[in-house]
Structure formats: structure tokens, C-alpha cells
Image (spheres, rainbow, N blue to C red):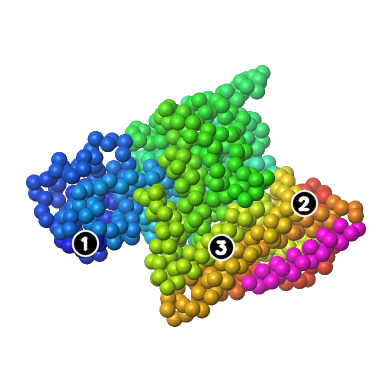
Amino acid sequence: MTIAEALARVRVVEVVKDDPLVLYTVAAELASMGCGEVEVVNGLTAEDRGSSVLRIHSNLATLPNGANVDVRGASSFRGVYLELDADGTGRLAASHSRFLYSFLTHLLRDLADADVASVSGGKFFKATFSWNRPTYDYFLTQEGRIQKNLNRETYVRRLAESGFTHLEVNGLAAPAGFESGPAGEAYPMFYTYCPALDQFVSSDLNKGLYPEAHLEANLDCLKKNADLARKYGLIPGLLCFEPRSVPDEFFDRFPMLRGARVDHPFRSFKPRYNMTIAHPAVREHYAEMVRKLVEAVPELGFLSVWSNDSGAGFEHTQSLYAGRNGGAYLIREWNNEKQVADAAAANALRFLATLRDAGREGNPEFRVCTRLESFYGEHDQMWVGLKDGLDAEATSLVTRGWDIPYSHAAYSDSKAFVGGTVHQQSYDAREAELAAELDARGSRVHLYFAAGPNTLFAPLIGVPYPNLTYSRLKLLEGNGVEYLAHVGGTNPMNQVPYNVNHELLRVFQFDPQLDPDVAIERIARRWVGALFANELVDAWAECEKAILAFPHVTPLYSTYGFVWYRLWVRPLVPNIEAIPEADRAYYQDFMCTTPHNPNNVDLSRDVLFQLTKVDECRKALIRIDENVWKPLDSAIEILEGTRRSAAGTLGDHNAIEETLVRLEALRCWFETQRSVAAWIVGVRGFLESSDGSEKAVCRQLLDEMIGREIDNTDRLIELLDSDVEFLATTDLNETPLMYGQNMKELLAKRKELMLAHRGDDPHIDAAYVERRASAVFKPPE
């Protein structure tokens, strides 16, 4: 008899009154599948246990003495206990409720056909990862929360079934943040994500600074997200940029509480300052806000602090864009560099401890986590202070700052945008040693993992790479990693019904010894049947060869920068300024940029950064052409043939059609990445060379690129007519952080301008920044 057959004999699913809500959710789902009715009782005992009753326990300690496996003594164990007899009598209990819903899905999808004898004596299923925490949950709390047709409940349900254990809940209720700024300034855009604590509650210190209606709407949104976390057993938490800037009105009230200048001087047109956390009144302000949030959501379990970017920063730290600066209470003007770094780190650690202690007043298990990359100037001092619930979030512990000790899996000479992604297929043994050092002090390390939206291929969603996902998971699990900082969250069910990367993650959570070939084939069989499963698996594998071979032209364009800088709708022509400014407004008005940002006319630069160089782009062109197209075209060809074979068999919306459209969109994305590299080689190479023949080669490359990109634009327009939602878009107004529903019109305009200006001479004004700054900001006569 199978487990599924035994479950069909369950006549009652029992839960105890006032147990965690997720137990009721699990019971209701079992009942909806025919496992009898749900009965709520006052308690579960060995004596009143009847036949064909499946009882769900709130934790392992509530199992009676009659349980067949003694798990109560295993206090460090994490996972789920299942006992099920052939007549439907059994028990289900989890060490932590955050594992329960994921295990239910594992039971129904992966264990249903197993012999019930395998669990009739009781079996313990260990959870691979203790924490699988979304960090920067693109769709639920960050800029993607305005995604067209987003259903928050089905989204959270997918997180829970996929093996996620935690949930970010602090998303703004409105499409944009409260922050404002001078006309033409980009800075307010950065306040729509990772909203600070003061966007949800106020304290005695800042009361009235933000409208009550604004705070109430945001807090209501936070609480509704937390309700969904509770329903599916996830631990709710926060991701905030802190200490973030506050409106100038605050310093009109309290001028002596001004802290650090935290804005990026090139991106902002006015300085932004935060409160000085060196002052006890400010620390109490933060503690009060945390207390209020834990009071509103008692289950609140963590706060992840990102800083020194997007209007946030710690006083006198080296990575502040304006340089080390801050309030008057921390350092003296004659302190040397080390003394300043010591004081800055001590101040930051005291602040983080203040947040932790305030959270623990309501939840003793409350933890605070912070990114280490921003503290490259204070790394050693921060490291020794991480203890007792002050955790580290990082790509790697081996190095400091944004440098990493890992190379691209396919290109040993490249470290661009590798750490945490599927392009990182190696692991330094020192990581485990340093993690153990933290663990001994009561701190934890949350290592970045990315197999979902926004981290790679933005704005594409649902790009499949299950084998690469498995390899990355196995690498982490094999090196003892228990805490994942899972960047981006997951894909919405409505937009991506076939989410193979996270489907594999789900299976891996309770079966890390799985055979990946078998697991991936089972997923394909469930979606397209035995007749077409091999073709789908083969297409995934070919696609992965292309993904693994892709050399990042620049990390900025491989992720959110692809959208911010409008690479799919801006015309790639030899001289961008030859296009009249009025004709460029359709995309420039929505670029996350300022009017004097060199990126407006030079794809190799952003603010004062040199993103990449001509030689690097030449290398990228060769690698893309030699290694990316063949396997990706092979994957598309496999799916095109399967679509013809499966016509009328699988229905209109099926995994073959979905995957085909997504891979065709990925090909368009790769093509535009190639075009960016070709533009940089063609334009910059032309301008930097004095050799006539080399200039001719650059000019020919540009012309070829423009022709290819025009064809690419046509393909993208065709794909937008499909029923598959392959990119993140909003049905509200287009924003600098998301494309809207007007993509086809923008692409048509792009094509028109590229046709009109493909013959222009290559040109970049070397004085663009200064010229545009004086032109834009010249006072009226």
C-alpha cells in the first residue's frame, strides 16, 4: 500500500485548539484532498487516539510517550516526524512550524507513491536548511510588489511549499516611497525598497514627521503580509536600509541630532542626513519603533540591516559616499584612521545590539543580521563584535568588502558577479572555519543564494536552470551551510506556473541525497507526462550550458541595471546625442539616472564608475558567440519540435510552451547584452584608436550590431504577443525600476530611431558631465 492510499483512509485530521495557524492550514489541505474532516480538540493524548485519525502536533515535544520514535531528546534536531499506518492512523509533527507546510508538499508530491511501511514505524525527515530566508523579496516587498496581477497569498504559499522558512513583510503600501527631492533627481527612487522602520511606526522623538495615514497604510500592509506568514508557518521579519535619512524638518526640531551625510553626491541634488545613532535619544527612538513592531506582530523574528547605500549609512564608516562623516558625539578631529574606524564599528555594533535587545523584549529569539560588505573599512572591528544574535549576511566570509575569492565557473579570469549565483561552483574551506567561529559566539552566517528573480536576467522571470540550482545547493549543503539568504524571493504563481528551480529547491530541503537526474525527470513527467519529459529535461540542460557560458558584460547590466538603464527600449546607436533630446524623452524620463550621468550617452560608464573596458568587451563578444548561441539554439529547437509533436495533447498553457517562450526571451536578453558589449567596442574602440583600419573594423561591428539588435527588437515584440508573462511588468504607471504595459510601443520607437541613426558617426562627448550639469542647472536669466 502506498502513502497516498493510506492517506485516503484517514477519516479525521485532528489539531489542538489554539495551536499555530499553520497546523490548521495543513489540516484543511489534507481534508480538501479527501483525508476526512478536520476536528479541533482540546488536547492530544495517547489514550484517546482512535483509528484512521491523523493527528498534527505543534512540536516534537507534544508527541506522547507512545510515539514509535523518540525524538523529544533531539533538541537540536530540525525537521519533521511522520508516522502513518495502513489504516490512516498517524501523527505529524515538526521541530519548528516553519518546516511543516513545505513537508506537506513534499509528502504529497514526492512521497505519495512510496510504501506506507516506510513510515508506519515513524520516520524522521531532516530539513536541509534551518533558515531559507528571502532577502530582498522582489515581488512581495520591493519594487516588484506592483507586478501586474500579483496575488500575495499564492506567492507566500509558493515560498512556503518551496522550502522557504522566513518571510520579509515590510513592503510599502504605495507604489513609491514618501521621499521627495528636486526636479530631475533620481534619489527618491531608492526609497521604494527596503523601507526603514520609521515608515511603519513612529516614536516619541519623531512623532508627526510622517503623516499618520501613511504609517497606518504601511503598517497594515506589513501586518497582512505577517498574517500570510502565520498561515503558512513562516517566520516574519524585516529588511531595512538603516540608519536611513530623515526629512529636513526633523533637524529643524533637533539640529544637534544630525548624523551622517548618506546620499550619493552624484545621484542626489541635495544632501540627505540621518539621525546620529551615537546619541542615546536616537537609539531609544529606534528601540521604541522595534518594540512597537514586535507588539504589532509578536512572531517577528528577525531584522536584516542593509546600509551605506540608498540613503542609509553608519556614521564615520569608510564606505559612505561622501566620505567618513557623522555627528558630533563619536570622534574628535585629531583621531587617526584606526581610531575613527574603531569608533565607527563600535557605534554600529551598539546600534545593532539596541535593535536586537528591543526585539527580544517581545520575542526572545529575535535576531539582527547585517551585510558585511559595506564595512570593508571596519571589517576586523565588526567581526569581533558579532555575537549572541547579531548575524552576518555575506557572499563570502573569506574576504572583505565586495571582493570575492571565487571565479566564474566557465572563465577563471572573471570574478564579475559570481558570488552567490549559479556561476559560483567552488567553495573555500576557510568559509566553514569562519562560520564556526561565529557560531561559537552565538552568531550565524547567512550566505547568499540566488535562483530566482531580479538577481540574474532581470527583468526576465522563470528562467529555468535546475541542474545549476542543484549544484549550488549541494555545494552549500556539502559544506555545512544551514542559513541561506535567498536573494530575490520566488516567482509569482500566476506569472510562472512552472518554477523548476524552486521546485528542485523544495525537494532538496528534505532529500539532499537525491539523484538530481531522477528528481528533475520526475518534475518534468509531472508537468508534461512521460511522452515529452525527456525533451523538456534536454532543453533545460542545453539552456544551462548557455547560462553557464554567459560572461557578464558588467554586473550592473546582468541584474537591476538592465531595467534602470532601459537597455531594452533605448536605441543603441553610434552617437546617442545625435538623437534630438525630445525624441529620447520616452525612455530617458524613466531611466534611474540624472541629466548629467555619463551613462546617458556612454554604456561603459555610470556616474564616476568605469563599468567595463573595450578589451573586456572584446573578450565577452568572443565568449558569447563561441559558447552561448549553440546550446541555447539547441534548447529552443528541441522545444519547437516538441511543441509540434504535442499539439493538441498538452493544452494551450503547458510547460513546453512556457519554457520555449522564456528561452526565446532569454535569447533576446543575451543578444542585447552582446549588443552592449559590441557598442562599447564599436564606439569607444573607434574613438580610442588612431588606426584607420581598426576604426573601420569598429564601424563595421557597430553596423552589424545595430542590424542584429533591430531584428532582436522585432523578436521581442512578437514574444510580447504570447500568453506567457516572461518579464516583470507593472500595470500601474511605468517606473524607473519596472517596465510597464507599453513595452511594444517603446520597442517600436526604439527600432525607428535605430533605423534613422544607424549611419551616424561614433561620438561621445568627453565633457558631457560638466556640460550637462551647467546646461541643466544654469539659473534663469
Other residues around mark 3 within 10 Å, as few (<14) / some (14–19) / many (≥20) = many
Q: Is residue 182 left or right of residue 223?
A: right
State the separation of the CA atoms marked 1 and 2. Answer: 65 Å
Q: Quadrant of residue 162?
A: bottom left
Q: Is residue 504 left or right of residue 329?
A: left
Which x, y percent locates residue 658? 49, 69
In-front residue for pair 170/42:
42
- Residue with the mark numbered 1: 1
- Residue with the mark numbered 3: 542
Instruction: Please state which amino acid type lies under the numbered disc 2.
Output: Val
* Residue at the bottom extreme of this rendering: 648
Look at 79% across and 58% down and name the residue there. Answer: 682
Instruction: Please state which amino acid type lies under the numbered disc 3.
Output: Glu
Quarter placement of the N terminus: bottom left
Res. 730 visible in picture: no
State the separation of the CA atoms marked 3 and 1. Answer: 39 Å
State which tag comes first along the sequence, 1 or 2: 1
Q: The magenta stretch spans which residues?
A: 692-715
SS of the residue under disc 3: helix
Which x, y percent locates residue 83? 21, 50
Total label count? 3
SS of the residue under disc 1: loop
Look at 43% across and 46% down and name the residue there. Answer: 133
State the separation of the CA atoms marked 2 and 3. Answer: 30 Å
Which numbered circle lies on residue 614? 2
